[in-house]
Image (cartoon, rainbow, N blue to C red):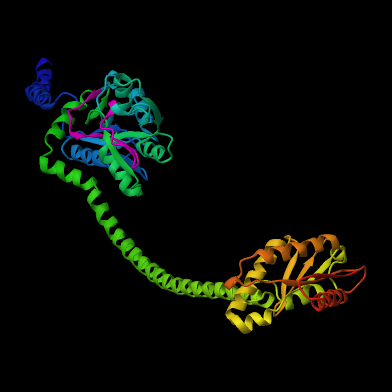
Amino acid sequence: MELRGLLRLLPLLMCMPLLAYAGRLAMANVKPAGQDVSVTQTVRCCVDPDWLPYEGIREGKHLGISSDYIDYIESHSSLKFQLVPTSSWTETLSFLQSGQCDLTPMLNKTLIRETYLHFSDVYFRSPNVLVSLKDQPFLQGFENIGARTLAVPKGYRLAEYIQHYYPQIETLTVASEPAGLQSVLDKRADLFVGSMFSVNSYIQQTGFNHLKIAGWGGPEDELRMGVAYGQESLLPMVNKALNAVSEQERITIYQKWNNVTVIDETNYSLVYQVICATFLLLLILGARTYFISQYNRRLTDKNQQLETLRQQLETSNAELEFLSTHDPLTKLYNRHYFNRLFINNEQHDKSAKAGMCLVMIDIDYFKEINDTLGHNVGDRILEQVSQVLQHCVRESDVVARWGGEEFVILCQQSSLPLVESLCVRIAERIKHYQFTDNVQLTCSFGVAKLADNEPMMLCFERADRALYRAKAQGRNQMCTDR
């Protein structure tokens, strides 16, 4: 019985050394957790959704410089990154603090962020710049901002930096860099501070060419990967992969996402088209302006000619009007004017006829002056007599040359005594006047007062009869028809 039991245990005893060896072999091949490169570890990744060309989310896909570095780390480690979409950078930071994300691939290291993140080595650097409208001055840096308002994205390292080192600057918090640039365009802020590469990319893509870089915006960005607390084991693998990126690969990634050159080429093509269209338009406008200017010049010349002709016509009409109503020698009113206005005009104001007197004047022996001294002397004497008459009458009186050596004076609002006194004054002035060639003159006067409801022609005939009597009675005297 004992022998039979021993025989049953013999196979088991023979296998025990083999089992022990297998156990030791298995234990030798087991490695601590996190060190087996054959095991893939999933990392939840959050990014800034609107910070291109650095990083962004478009149609649920991670894009930008940081996406290429994430791809590189995935291909050189056992890490597999899973994008956790966020709507803003502020939400990304909140997810990192709450543990909803394990890593963010591109951010600056700050004292506040160090309270909930561990940071990798710096793998990308970029300057920050101030952006303003083109009509603003170049400010060089934060020191020269003065009373201007500065737009700063919420949650960015620059907001913390400005609050600590430049608390006197008035800031406007915006949701993102594009929103900050828009605030400058809308004049809600005077300046915006952000990364030079993303600012330049946004300006190029949107065509906001009236924005300009107005100065440097504080310290340059030293971009790292941030790992949430509790995920510190990721840092060695992340740093190892980042340090393995060659300079050529870094340049390739930068050039891929720095689309300034591509945009410039596209814009130049558009600019060439616009220049050609503008040149053609300017050519058409220039030709049109030239023809219009030529037409306007000819029209101006014609208008000037017409204006000259009009002025000449007005001058000629004025001369004709003057000649039609004045005596060309004495420049007194002529017989035609006197007849038209006073004798033949039945519509003449009756109130004007009240107190109206007529004086007919004839130069004595004037024919002898023409015969002995000549008509030139006679014409000169007629001019001098007309001057005497004009100096003796009132402004309201009308003096006219009736013909030859006869003159007529129409005195309005007057009386026979006043008119007779006028005749005496005229005779006395002529007696003492120094006429041409010392000619001594006398005149005969015929006076008549216009009766009530008497036609002017009858009054004129009575004055003419009175003049005839004065000449018949020996001349150099006055006769009145009462």
Q: Which x, y percent locates residue 44? A: 30, 32
Toward the right, the furthest residue is 452
Q: Is residue 43 above or below residue 118?
A: below
* Image side of residue 186 versus residue 453, left or right: left
* Image side of residue 415 versus residue 266, left or right: right
Number of numbered tags placed on the structure image: 0
Q: Is residue 170 above or below residue 190?
A: above
Q: Is residue 132 above or below residue 381?
A: above
Where on the picture, by quarter, is residue 214? top left
From the image, which quarter does the N terminus lie in? Answer: top left
Q: Which x, y percent locates residue 4? A: 11, 20
Res. 461 in view: yes
Q: Where are the magenta residues, as a range?
A: 118-143
Res. 375 in view: no
Where on the picture, by quarter, is residue 36? top left
Residue 151 belongs to magenta span: no
Q: Which x, y percent locates residue 226? A: 25, 27
Residue 142 belongs to magenta span: yes
Toward the bottom, the furthest residue is 371
* Image side of residue 8 versus residue 286, left or right: left
Which of 436/235 is in front? 436
* Image side of residue 37 versus residue 444, left or right: left
Toward the front, the furthest residue is 474
Where on the picture, by quarter, is residue 353? bottom right
From the image, which quarter does the C terminus lie in? Answer: bottom right
Q: Which x, y percent locates residue 120? A: 19, 27
Which of 161/122 is in front? 161
Which of 45/160 is in front? 160
Q: Residue at x 70, y 78 (%)?
A: 405
